[in-house]
Image (tube, grey):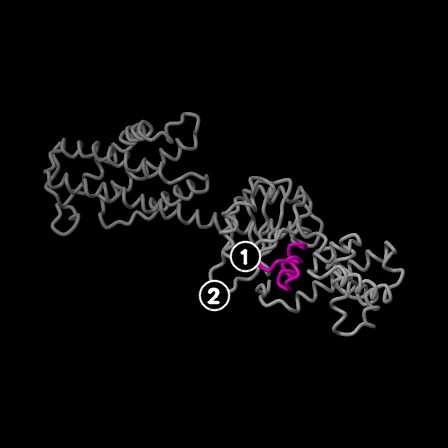
Amino acid sequence: MAVPTPRGVSMGPGGAPVPPELAGLLRAQLEEVADEVEAEVRRQVPEYARPADGTYREHLRAGVVQALTLFVDHIADPRGQGAAIAATYYELGRGEAQEGRSLDALQSALRVGGLHAWRLMGRTAEQLGLDSAVVSALGELAFRTVHEVAEAAAAGYAEAQLRSTDELERRRRRLLDLLLGDGPVSLEAVQDLAHGARWRVPSQVAVVALAAPADLRSQEQLPAMPGALVDIDSRPPRVLVPDPEGSGRFGERSFALGLGGRPAAIGPTVPLTDAAQSLHWATRALGLMGRGILPRQGAVRCADHLSTLLLHSDEPLLARLEARVLAPLDAASDGQRPRLAETLLAWLLSGSNVPDVAARLHVHPQTVRYRLRQLEKLFGDALHDSDARLELILALRSASSRDQDASGSTSVPAP
């Protein structure tokens, strides 16, 4: 069939004009061409070849028809924007992201479908006797169409991914707030939130409390902990770690490297619904690290320092105990008092073994015996009463920790 001498719009500077009448001829073949393009895409792109997936088939058919329509519309009016069809591909891209698929399948379908459509429509143009310049212009138009819809799909995909990531983070933050909040935690509520946050519900967790970075201008550094829920904006920053006893979690080199030299306290492992308790003790431990009562650097496990945490869990009460139990030492001179306290604690901890005390303190056994005689005068029968000895150990440990705190030269940055 001959086509009248072109009266169409040029495709670009120096480009051959495409007769707008061609749009009507191609539009009449659109359904037939769509059938062939769909079959070719299904043959070459495995994701669209699944016979049981009706949704994919519907998306494929709609996408093919829309792209072909845009191509024909461009022939009818090369200046047209095709905004509605671009919006369709934008939504197709969003749909791929929301379904958790990559954009590769859709992009492959566009390449395969665009090439095959061009072959079919180019063949029609040749049959109509259009010259090679017009056929070449149609080819450029076909690839322009593919480029437009591909860009629209990519934009929709990127927007959905961004929204999905932001929403996922919000849901995980709500989940973390629930787990670490003050009130009782319902496992059913946790499971509901965890489903929306795409988080596998563990049976046990531990919470890591992090000291503020030494350089507040530096970027936050966190260990690589798969599945962890993170709140870097809280004070102290905290990380809830699922299944902390598995796979050497806190013993792995990656955990230490991830800290970047930053002090951290690892709360005890607890059932999921008791996560707030793990945070409580991790925060307490971090505070004791800052005072030098616990090691100042590295990662400190609360499980390794339970007695110290217990001892300092109620410091006002501990101070009262210390003042009452150690009152007899006030009778000693300022120079004698620290030596007598050190000797008494070593003696109590060694089971009253004088040679052991001497070895611990690096003094002669006779010096230990001399100090013990002084202590007998000050404390009397309390040194041999089991309840009194326990209170003495607690009070002396407290005093020793306080002295270490006062003499410490390096501090952990405040939580």
Find residue 51 and report its horizontal and vertical position in percent.
41, 25
Find residue 187 and report its horizontal and vertical position in percent.
67, 42
Tell me if residue 294 is in the magenta stretch: yes
User: How many discs appear?
Assistant: 2
The circle drawn on residue 103 is none
Q: Which residues are magenta?
A: 280-297
Is 406 or 224 nearer to us in this picture? 406
Is 265 or 41 nearer to us in this picture? 265
> Going 74% across and 65% down the picture, which residue do you hit?
399
Disc 1: CA contacts within 10 A as few (<14), some (14-19) or many (>=20): some
The circle drawn on residue 217 is 2
Residue position marked by numbered label 1 in the rendering:
232
Give the left or right position of residue 172, taking residue 183 as reference: left
- CA–CA distance between discs 2 and 1? 14 Å
The vertical placement of 317 against 93, above or below, is below
Task: Please tell me whether mark 2 sits on a helix, a strand or a loop.
Answer: loop
Give the left or right position of residue 403, taking residue 62 as reference: right
